[in-house]
Amino acid sequence: MNGNRKRVAILISGRGSNMMALVEAARAADYPAEIAAIVSNRADAPGVAWAEGQRLPVAVVDHKAYPSREAFDEAVDALLAKAGVDLVALAGFMRIQSASFVRKWLGRQLNIHPSLLPAFKGLHPQKQALDAGVKISGCTVHFVTEELDGGPIVAQSAVPVAEGDSPESLAERILAAEHRLYPLALALVA
Ligand code: GRF
């Protein structure tokens, strides 16, 4: 193994398909990052079961067990410190982070969002794209800043919107692009 590989934590809340894409990419000997920790705020996230099955270092930090956003973020941060993490990759992590956590990881924390930012920030971006009638959408990997889905863009991938698309069919097409884009973007940053 290459000793210069950046140590990455992946934060999830659900299905974890982007996490899986990053894990698979990091299995290549020449990939510049290794997965040092996977953290979920939900014990029942399907991604947790998958990561456990792969014998990956996965931890659950249940946000409901903490009195505040800050306290939850501090627990996550302590875990990242213990794992010697260099970079954080949010992958379907459905928690807004405290300003102090975001500032601490500024320039070292990525997120993936299923739209071509700055269009369609926030929830249900695929439905937003359909409602707007755009013919091309896609996905964006960006640095995390205090502005939701608003940080500097690292990489994007465009996906056509098809006639008759539903939010679900568009999401599925974008997700396939996400799985290619995130490993590339993380490698760039690493
Ligand atoms: C992805 O569409 C990602 O862009 C968004 O949430 C979804 C997570 O999916 N932030 P998964 O958990 O990675 O399968």
Image: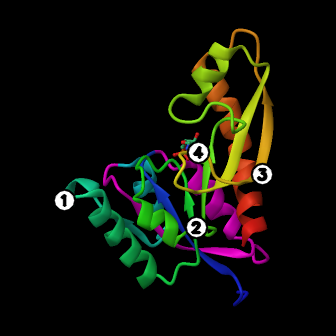
Q: Which mark is residue 148?
A: none
CA separation, marks 1 and 2? 24 Å
Answer with mark 1 or mark 2, whichever residue precedes in sequence: 1
Which secondary structure, mark 1?
Answer: loop
CA separation, marks 2 and 4? 14 Å
Q: Which mark is residue 155?
A: 3
Which secondary structure, mark 3?
Answer: strand
* Percent position of residue 54, x then y: 50, 65
Which secondary structure, mark 2?
Answer: loop
Residue at 62% x, 46% y is 150
Residue at 69% x, 34% y is 174
Q: Please state if 153 lies on the left or on the right of 146 as rendered.
A: right
Which secondary structure, mark 4?
Answer: loop
* Percent position of residue 18, x then y: 60, 51
Q: Quadrant of the N terminus?
A: bottom right
- Amino acid, disc 1: Pro
Which region is colored magenta? 15-44
Answer with mark 3 or mark 2, whichever residue precedes in sequence: 2
Tell me, yes or no, if residue 63 can be seen here. Answer: yes
Answer with mark 2 or mark 4, whichever residue precedes in sequence: 2
- Name the residue that disc number 1 marks: 67
From the image, state whether disc 1 or disc 3 is nearer to you.
1
- Name the residue that disc number 2 marks: 106
- Amino acid, disc 3: Ala
Above or below, 54 relative to 83: above
